[in-house]
Amino acid sequence: MIGIILSIFLLSNTLKIDLEQAKQIAIENNPAYGIEELNYRYYKLGLYDELSSNILNPSIGVTYSDVTYEQWPYTSLEGYNFSFSLNQTVFDIQELASIIQSKSSVNSAGATLEEATNALYYQVEAQYLAVLKAEKLLQMRQNAIKRAEENMRLVSKRQELGQASKLDILNALVSLNRAKLYLSSAGKDYQIAKRLILNILGIWHQTEILLEPVETDNDFELPDLDTLITISLEARPTIKAAREEMKNSNIGFWGSMLSFVPQVSFRWLWNYSSEDFPDNFSTIRDEAVKSSGWSASASINLFTYPFEVSKMKTIMDMTKLNLLNKRLSVVEDVKEAWLDCMTVYENLNLAQSLYDAAKEGDDLAKLQYELGLISTLELFQSENDLLDAEVTYVSAQYDCKLAKAKIKYVVGGEI
């Protein structure tokens, strides 16, 4: 589906999408997220490599040589050699630790990828809302231009009739120029917002983007702060990744501590050597030399052993502190997002009250102006107050939507 959308986009140079489609396009095209995906794949391949090197490993070899040693005339390596062997590590504490560490690294990389996914979704939603907000403010500024131009026309007509002074004309001109200035700034903000979301979507070339409106989540209820912190400390992927890193370092420490434990392996070897290439396979089969047996070995460097153990202990302590630091950071994120959410909801109620009062005041100002009870300056001030209140109200609405998205991101789970 996303491929079809992008194909249509490439043909028309216009991308019309909703929020969910934007998230999927970002997942498929955002280069920073692509790096995280490749990092996860790298660690999975590392685990497969570790596992494959510790299962029954068959190997086959064929060599030919005409090497002779002049010092030992009766010694020669000339001829053909066929070999087949099965090698199986039965017990190796270092290899076992390495496998468990690889699995832990995969889990950590998976949690990091999940965190990157959540972060990308939040970035897309935040910038998506920023574009919608900038578009709405631009429309409001365009409407303000129309009102200012209409006011200019009416004041000019009243001046012709002797009902308006030169000061009224100047006031109307100032109001019109101010509206043009704000419109220019709003247009720039809108274009920048669209470019930023295209960057997040991984689309580098210039294009027109049309975004569908976002539905309001009326069922959202903000849980208390302690509940959110409890959820985040369990569900936040960055905490999961830090836990896996600590587990990885613990395994590495105990692996280094037990590095003196003997390694046990089994090998079966089938070998055939001849100066002449054999006529058929039965010759190789019948005359081949077979051998099998167990081996065990253990070694320890008395000088480097304590340093290696101390080094792994240091890494283990570092990962413990890193987990604590991640927890503190997540708690801080949740507290900040929770306070932001509480504040924007309070601001939304205040902004709505401000807008309602400004709208009523503007209606009264227009009526009083028609009756000649107030000046043009007072009328224009009333209109500016209404526009400012409307901008504040619209901004507060989008701030609430963004605050909800941030809460979901910092918690890392469903709330």
Image (spheres, rainbow, N blue to C red):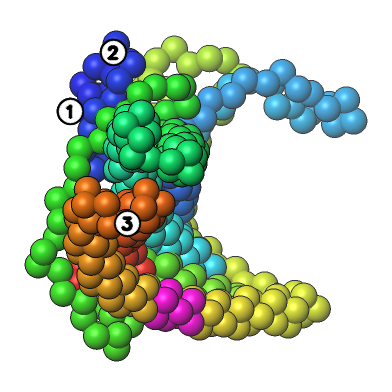
* Residue depth check, mark 2 versus mark 3: number of the one nearer the observer: 3
Q: Quadrant of the C terminus?
A: bottom left
**Spatial CA span between label 2 and label 3:** 53 Å
* Apparent side of residue 245 relative to residue 142 in the rendered image (left or right): right
Q: Which of pointers 1 and 3 indicates the residue nearer the eye?
A: 3
Q: Is 370 displayed left or right of 129 in the figure? A: left
Which residue is under mark 3? 374
Measuring 45% from the left and 51% from the top, which residue is drawn there? 43
Q: Quadrant of residue 254?
A: bottom right
The circle on residue 118 is none
Whole-Å distance between the Cαs marked 2 and 1? 17 Å
Query: Who is closer to the viewer here, 339 or 54?
Result: 339
Q: Which residues are magenta?
A: 327-336
Where residue 377 appears, as percent x and y from the top left, is 41, 51
Q: Amino acid at mark 1?
A: Met
x then y, percent, for residue 298: 62, 72
The residue identified by callout 1 is 1
- Residue pictured at 27% horizontal, 30% vertical: 210
Separation of residues labelled 1 and 3 (CA atoms): 59 Å
First in residue order: circle 2 vs circle 1: 1
Q: Is residue 316 magenta?
A: no
Residue type, numbered disc 3: Ile
Q: Which mark sits nearer the N-terminus, 2 or 3? A: 2
Element under label 3?
Answer: loop
Q: Earlier in the sequence, mark 1 or mark 3?
A: 1
Residue identified by numbered label 2: 12
Which secondary structure is most common in the magenta stretch?
Answer: helix
Residue 343 visible in this rendered orientation of the protein: yes
* Residue 287 drawn at (x, y percent): 45, 31
Give the quadrant of the N terminus.
top left
Res 80 quadrant in image:
top right
